[in-house]
Amino acid sequence: MKTSSKKATSINLLNFRTPQMKAFHLSWIAFFLCFFGWFGIAPLMAVVREELDLSKFQIGNIIISSVAITIFARLAIGWLLDRIGPRITYTYLLILGAIPVMLIGFSNSYESFLVFRLMIGVIGAGFVVTQYHTSMMFAPNVVGTANATTAGWGNLGGGVTQMLMPLIFAGFVSIGFLDQEAWRLAMVVPGILMVICGFLYYRHTTDLPEGNLKDLKKEDFADKVEKKASKVSFATVSKDYRVWLLFLIYGACFGVELTINNIGAIYFHDFFELDLKTAGLIAGLFGLMNLFARSMGGFFGDKAGMNWGLKGRVWLLGAVLLAEGLSLVLFSQINILPFAIGSMIVFSLFVQMAEGATYAVVPFVNRKAIGTVSGIVGAGGNTGAVLAGFLFKSESLSYSDALAILGITVTLVSVFSFLIRFSKEDEQEASEELINSIAEKNMEVAPAYLMEK
């Protein structure tokens, strides 16, 4: 694999040897398992609701708690990544985050369940580590695709969880455990897998293509990296209006995905009167679109960047976000099951494409503080989910009404995409990086946009 400044200029999915592809594969697997633990309880909420006698208001608070703390965790980890690197950060996040996942089974009241659900939300910060690690490993011509694919395959854990956890629960019931015991035991499974992944991440990844920051401290390269990160404070990054526009935009796409992960199974269970396993399987289809949909957003973002520069990436983001909002409104109004499933799949396609398109823009906002920018924007996703949670806890709104309001909000937010601007210097730097990465791949003809530069 040819690289520019050691960053990979292509993605070879069958390569498990280079540091770039090791980081690629282990980062999406790690985030997949974070999602598995984060939302493992969601498809079992109908059972938990019955045992703990939870009201709709209380379930709404639980939904909010599951994503609220992730806002602060993502901000903190974004800052941390610029200083200690992704390898150590992810290792501790996976191993320590597994503890509340496994211990939620000790809940015996609404209050204790709420606390554990809040603690579990910290592992959602794994997304920022995944995006940071691939941004450090891949060149500008493929960084959007790499970011989108690792995040998308990680998000796939949300869909698999909806399908798999009811089956794990049913497996424990089939061997003689009661329902109130089975859901508790089922949550141990993702926790164990997270611990195993944490050790694998520590052993088999490096912070950068050149090696680990700790090992490179004596070299000029590592010193430059650390100095570059330390020169850009959180306050400086937070003054950039584009960061907050992307924060808002990501709340309108990833925030929506988190919301559907939380309420999808119980929505189909209640609204269409389906059993737990069937509702979970259908809700899981939403997350399964991550297999390719988010990658599409990143891929087309990279293509738009090659042909029209950074503004091309922004235009694509705005268009996909608009399509997401309109398709969500459509989904909310359908009460015939087959059509509801079909419209949900279309809606899911645009949600995840918008997420991929967002992180095809993020690496170019501030190259000296990619971790901090990723953390702030990633926190926007959870902020969106928290705000959406207030809609779904309202006793006066049905879930369908809440989804419709959410869709209208996303449609309005899409307009803000077109306010994101890059300077001529940003465009020039991005085009030069692309030319260099294309040259490394021995491409004979560069796109017309780049040749003009």
Image (cartoon, rainbow, N blue to C red):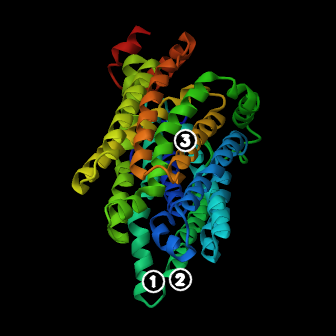
Please name the residue that numbered disc 2 is placed on.
181
Depth order, front residue of 170/376: 170
Q: CA distance from mark 2 to mark 1?
A: 8 Å
Residue under the point 36% across and 54% down: 288
| Circle 2 SS class | helix
- Mark 1 Cα within 10 Å, few/some/many (few <14, many 20+)? some
Residue under the point 24% across and 54% down: 336
- Mark 2 Cα within 10 Å, few/some/many (few <14, many 20+)? some
User: Residue farthest to the front?
Assistant: 396
Residue under the point 67% across and 42% down: 75
Q: Could you tell me the amino acid type at mark 1?
A: Phe
**Quadrant holding the N terminus:** top left
**For marks 1 and 3 on the same chain, the one whose residue lies earlier in the sequence:** 1
Query: Are circles 2 and 1 on residues that touch, CB within 8 Å?
Result: yes
Please name the residue that numbered disc 3 is placed on.
384
Q: Could you tell me the amino acid type at mark 2?
A: Glu
